[in-house]
Amino acid sequence: MSKMYRRDLLRAAGITIGLPFFSSLRMDKVVASEATQAGSPKRRMVCIGNMLGFLPEAYWPQIANQPSTKDASNDSSNTGLSIHRDYEWGRTTKSMQSIRDRMTMIAGLDHDTKGGHFSIHTFLSGVRQIDSKSMPNANVTIDQFAAEAVVGQTRFSSLTIGSESGIHGGCQLSWTRTGTRVPPITGPEQLFRLLFVGSNEKDKAVVADRFKLQGSILDLVLDDANRFQGKLNHQDRNKLDEYLTSVRDVEKRIGLRRNWIDIPKPQPPIAAPKNRNMVEDLPLLYDLIALALQTDSTRIATLEIGGDFNPKDLGVKGDYHGLSHHGQRQESIEALVTIETYQIEQFVRFIEKLSALKDGEQSLIDQTMVLFGSGMGNANSHANTNLPVVLAGGGFEHGRMLAFDKDASHRPPLTNLFVTMLQNFGVETDQFATSTGTLRGLA
C-alpha cells in the first residue's frame, strides 16, 4: 500500500496526523530497571481512588494521649512530621485493624489544588487538567508513568477500572502523558473477558490489524516530521529530535506488545461473571485485579469507586453525591458511614487476599504497593486538603500513622509519596509533577 493511499485511507477513517507545537514536544524518558527485567522479584502497584472522599470525623483515627515519635533524626528537614503507633480507629476504618501491620495511614498530604470535585481527578497526578499544558509531562498519573517502564513485560502494561457514569462523565482516575483520559474497563464481565477470553485466530487477527493501523499512523507522523526537518533552525531541530525519539519509543512499545499476540491467555480459575451493580461488583473487581497480578497479566492496576455506586444497593436511602454534601444532617451522615465502612471493608479484604496469594517465596502484598484514598478531603465543604491516604504492602515499614503538620511550610506534597512509590517500583526518577523529593517517614 502506498504512503499516499494509506494517508488518504486513514484520513477517510477520521484519523488526522499532525505534529504538535515544538515547545510542547519534550518527553522525559522513563527507564525500566535492568534488574527487574533480569528476573528479580516483581514489583506491582495498585491505586484505588474514591470520587467523593471519606467523612473526616468518621475516617481519621484518634491519636492516643502519649507522645509521638519524630522522624528518624531531629534535623530541621524533619520538622512537621509525627509518627504514631498508638491510635484508635475511626468509625469507618475499624476494619483496618486486621491489616494494621501491612499498611500506613498518612495524614496532612494533598496536592495544594483547589477545585472541589474537579480536583478529584488530580488524585494520581497532582495536576489539574486545565493546568496540564504548563507541565512537562502534562497531568500523567503515577500508574501510567510507571507503566511506561514495564511495557512488554506483561500482556497489559496497566489496567484501568471504573465507571462511565457519574459526575463529570465517568472514571477520570488515569491520564496519559499527552493529557488524555484512559477509558476504563467498566465491570467484572469486561475485565474477565480481557484477562481470560480471546485467544482464537479471529481475535488474534483483529489485534494484529490494530497493531498494523498503529504502525501506519506512526509512519505518517515520521513522514511529516522528516518533511519539516530541513526547514527548522538549530534549536527547533533539537526539539524535533526529542520528538522523534519519543515516537520511536512508541514504536518500540507497540513492538513489545505485539509479541503477546500468539501467547495464550491463562485459564480462568473462576466462572465468567455478569455485571450487576457497583456494590455487588466491588469485591469481584478486587478478586479479578488480584488474579491479574497473580497470573502476571499486569503489574499495574487502578480502580475508581463512586461513579455508579448506588447506596440503595446497600439498603441506604439517597443519592451518593447528595449524601456527601450532608450539611451536618445526622441521617445523611449515618448513610455515609454505612457506605464508606463497606468500601473500606472491601479494601481490607483485598489486602488480606494479596497477603494469602504467593509468588515464589513472597506473598503478593510484599511485592505490591496498594494506594488507597481520594482526591477529595471533605466533600461537604468541597475541600481538597488533608486527603485520606493509605499505603499498604510493597515492602515498606508499616503499622504506623504518619501525620504531617498542616502548616504548609512544613508539609510536603502528596506527589512526594508518588516519587517514593515509583522508585520502589524500579523507575529511575527523582521527580514527579509538583514533587520536592521523596516522602519523609517511609522506610
Image (tube, helix red, strand yellow):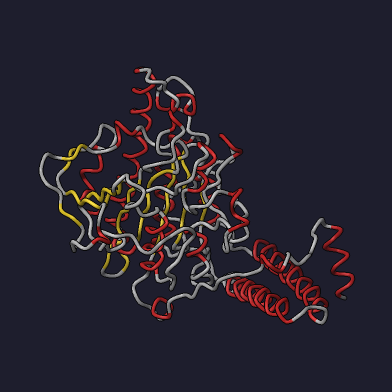
Which one is nearer the viewer's eye here, 183 or 325? 325
Residues 2 and 54: in front is: 54
Task: Give the answer, above or below, for where 194 lies relative to 21.
Answer: above
Percent of width and height locating residue 132: 59, 54
**Residue positioned most to the left:** 66
Is 228 displayed left or right of 355 in the figure?
A: right
Task: Check the image and report above or below for 305 versus 41.
Answer: above
The reply, left or right, for residue 217 in relation to residue 263 is right
Res 135 quadrant in image: bottom right
Q: Which image quarter is the N terminus in?
A: bottom right
Residue name at image x 40 percent, y 76 percent: 36
Q: What percent of the width, then of the height, locates residue 259?
A: 58, 74
Above or below for 287 versus 241: above
- Image mark count: 0
Residue 440, by quadrant, is bottom left
Left or right of residue 358, residue 49 in this image: right
- Image quadrant where one finds the C terminus: bottom left
Q: From the top left corner, tell me how far across and down residue 407 is, in percent.
A: 32, 46
Q: Position of residue 370 (x, y in %)?
A: 36, 54
- Residue occupying the point 39% across, 61% down: 294
The residue at 33%/39% (across/down) is 344
